[in-house]
Image: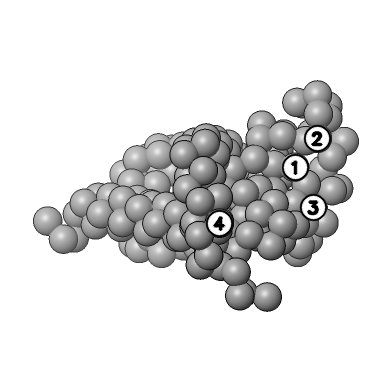
Amino acid sequence: MYDNIFTEQSFQQALEVLQNEIPMAIWETLYVTLISTAFSVIIGLPLGVLLVVGEKGGVLPLPKPILSVLNVIINLLRSIPFLILMIMVFPLSRLLIGTTVGTTATIVPLVVAAFPFVARLVEGSLREVNPNIIEAAQSMGATPMQIICKVMIPESKPSLISNITVALITVLGYSAMSGIIGGGGLGKIAINYGYYRYKYLVMYIAVIILVLIVLLFQTIGTRASVKSDKRLR
């Protein structure tokens, strides 16, 4: 199975892929990952905030049925395996993008899969905020929106950055899986060459690049989280 990995022909083909396909694949992977994560945060951040501030005793209590529906939707979407979710979201992708195949089309299922995950991560970060700080803001007459925007989110910024980094890396992993349904990027190269053509050297190169991108994201996220933590200043 792996007998022909390091032959001269394998090296030659890997070099051709590195020159002709890998640069565009890296760009497609970064494009899909960053855009999908950005939309996931835009949707997931408010939902995560609502899950915390909307509960009984929160700064902005919501009716229990509304909170229950939010929790059910988030839990339901999180419980569906990504490969199945991609197929289920085909109609939505066709409605929004006009197609279900291609790099841009994979953004839709990626966002649908990631925003519930982001919402839970945001919920966890906000629950770490010291309740005494919130009570102090309330005693000074701060409105719920002021407490959310000027107390809860700033106080949880280091944790939020760390969790968004986790979400970014998760979306990167999902984007690689989207190569199965015609999505572009490094995942497509790894699947096309490693699974369909048995060119394992090319697959390993794609995987190594994915690992390096993960390390880059993690390093940037960790440094940003540490830099934003006022306790370390």
Q: Residue at x 77, y 35 (%)?
A: 101
For label 4, the crowd category at 10 Å Cα-Cα, with few meaning under 14, some 14 to 19 and many 20 or more, is: few
**Identity of the residue drawn at 50% across and 60% down:** 8
- Tell me if label 3 and label 1 are in contact, CB under 8 Å: no
Are the residues at dot 4 and dot 1 in contact (C-beta closer than 8 Å)? no
Say few, some or many: other residues with alpha carbon within 10 Å of mark 1 (under 14 / 14 to 19 / 20 or more). Answer: some
Mark 1 and mark 2: Cα distance apart in space: 8 Å
| Mark 4 lies on residue | 9
Q: Position of residue 76 (x, y in %)?
A: 78, 59
Q: What quarter of the picture does the C terminus occupy?
A: bottom left
Q: Is residue 135 above or below residue 104?
A: below
Relative to 231, 57 lies left or right: right
Callout 4: helix, strand or loop? Answer: helix
191 vs 12, left or right, is right
Q: Amino acid at mark 1?
A: Gly
Q: Which residue is mark 3?
A: 85
> Which of the two labelled residues, at mark 1 and mark 2, occupies the earlier sequence position?
2
**Residue that badge 2 annotates:** 100
Measure how far apart labels 4 and 1 are at the Cα level: 27 Å
- Between circles 3 and 2, the one closer to the viewer is 2
Total numbered labels: 4
Residue type pointed to by label 3: Leu
Circle 3 Cα neighbour tier, 10 Å, few/some/many (<14 / 14–19 / ≥20): some
